[in-house]
Image (cartoon, rainbow, N blue to C red):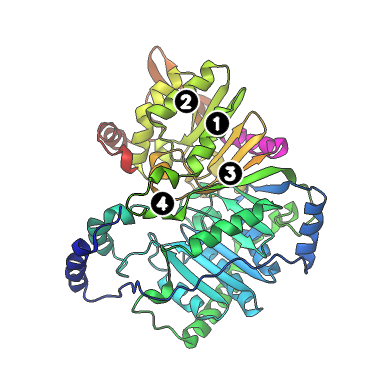
Amino acid sequence: MRAHPSLIRPVVVVLAWALGACATLQTDMPRPKSSALPAVADSASTRYVAGEVAAHPGQSGFRPLLGNANALISRVVLADAARHSIDLQYYIFRNDATGRLIAQRLLAAADRGVRVRILLDDLDISKEDRLLDALDVHPNIEVRLFNPFRFRQRSLLSKAGQFLIEGPRLNRRMHNKSFIVDGMQAIVGGRNIGDAYFDAGDEVHFRDLDVLAIGPVVPQVSAMFDRYWNSDAAFPVTAYSDNRVTEANLAILRDRLLRDARAFKESEYADVVAEDLPNGPSAERKGAWFWGEARLAADDPDKVDPAPGVDERRLRRIAPALRHVLDTAQSQALLVSPYFIPGDDGVALLTALVARGATVKVLTNSLSATDEPEVHAGYAKYREALVKGGVELHELKGLGGVGNQRAYGTSSGVSLHAKAMVIDHRQVFVGSMNFDPRSVKLNTEMGVIVDSPGLADAVEQFFAHATAPENAYRVELDDGHLRWTGRDDGKAVEFDHDPGASRWQRAKLRVMRVMPIEGLL
């Protein structure tokens, strides 16, 4: 997918002139390699973790982070307890209330001497540049951008122009998500960093799922972070020619973040979070862990820009791993994916599981719960074939329902963002990967595969609540036509079209279903 330099350079010069000689990426910038620090049990938190792990040799422990407020405070508590290192890898890190709260806790950790490495995908960075530049000034913090744009002009026009030049490279993104502390605790799952993922702000909130992990799987997560951090696609923020921030900028940022953190502490949201604290959000609070053998499944970082002659299938590691687990289903397979585009092969796989006696259930977004109708069109293309083949389809409602429960979102709009799978009540996947072509072929993804009946039961309960008739519509066949059934305001309802969607939305959906765009979704 690499374009030949002789083709890129002339167009790059023209684009640079058109963008007014804005900041450019200096690709020859030194990129010193670094690796995870050795795990040392020398604090109350890490000694507790070491004791728990020692009592379960060969197994990893997990706690599902189901509530969004709980997921936020878990990250805050872990950052506050860090003594040696914090490594973050995210697709999105917003410069909003919760993003700034996390940034403030990371800065406080760095001030204590903790080494902080932040690796972010560059696609959605817009208002975050100055925040990240200032953090990077700290001697204990380093920020790198993965697969960055050549020009640091964040306008839509600039990005569109750069996609025209380097679309094959820029269309491949790092979708991984991990938060690793002292090499002994890690949060892995579907959430990015930002208000929408933690029930803050007024925008649509995401219903999501992470796991807090301890034990042998954590070094695997750390090792994969190192591979991405040291890869050819990761560049320091200082590689942009306009990065001229100083310690004075960092001092200003420190004061502003502290002010914002104090305001956050006094907010109504903080009162809600305080109510959730007794639920044990962090590893330092004693409580039940779900134990089992676990392994990390993750794509190779070179998947975003494979070298000439490399078989790209060798770089796709997570999809084959999940396919293998799904193939083993004997009694039940539960799939949770906000973007669900199975393709003909996926339909054949899922309906074959049904044919051999397994119950297959899928939870995805309804048309009213997504702001990407083109993705929903890709899914809608296969709906009828899945239902005919015996697959049980559920579509999360976009308004009301789960939004009325604080643990799963408090705005008027709710959208599914969790990615998970449960096989035969014991094999569990939680991670960043959707069941769609983009996750398989273009983006890099990661997640954990765990053999744990206890964790499986917890995720199954999450699934059961999300698919209750009050929260999701069941898609069924009635006399050869699709029907959506559920309950609204305590009353049974039935629709013969995508519920909650306008005529215009449904018309767009019909057009998009016949467009040849599935490979780009």
**Mark 2 or mark 4: whose residue is earlier in sequence:** 4
Q: Mark 3 points at which residue?
A: 430
* Residue 65 drawn at (x, y percent): 64, 49
Residue 326 image label: 1
Residue 303 image label: 4
Q: Nearer the viewer, mark 4 or mark 3?
A: 4
Toward the viewer: 158 or 163?
Answer: 163
Q: What span is in magenta?
A: 452-469
Q: Magenta span: helix, strand or loop, mainly?
A: helix
Toward the viewer: 519 or 462?
Answer: 519
Q: Residue furthest top?
A: 479
Name the residue at 61% across, 65% down.
36
- The part of the image, by quadrant, that contains residue 51 is bottom right
Residue contact between numbered discs 2 and 4, judged by CB atoms under 8 Å: no
Q: Is residue 179 above or below residue 140?
A: above
> Mark 3 is on which residue type?
Val
Residue 336 is at least partly visible in this image: no
* Residue 361 drawn at (x, y percent): 54, 27
Q: Distance between the residues labelled 1 and 2?
A: 9 Å
Q: Say which quadrant the C terminus sits in.
A: top left
**Mark 2 or mark 3: whose residue is earlier in sequence:** 2
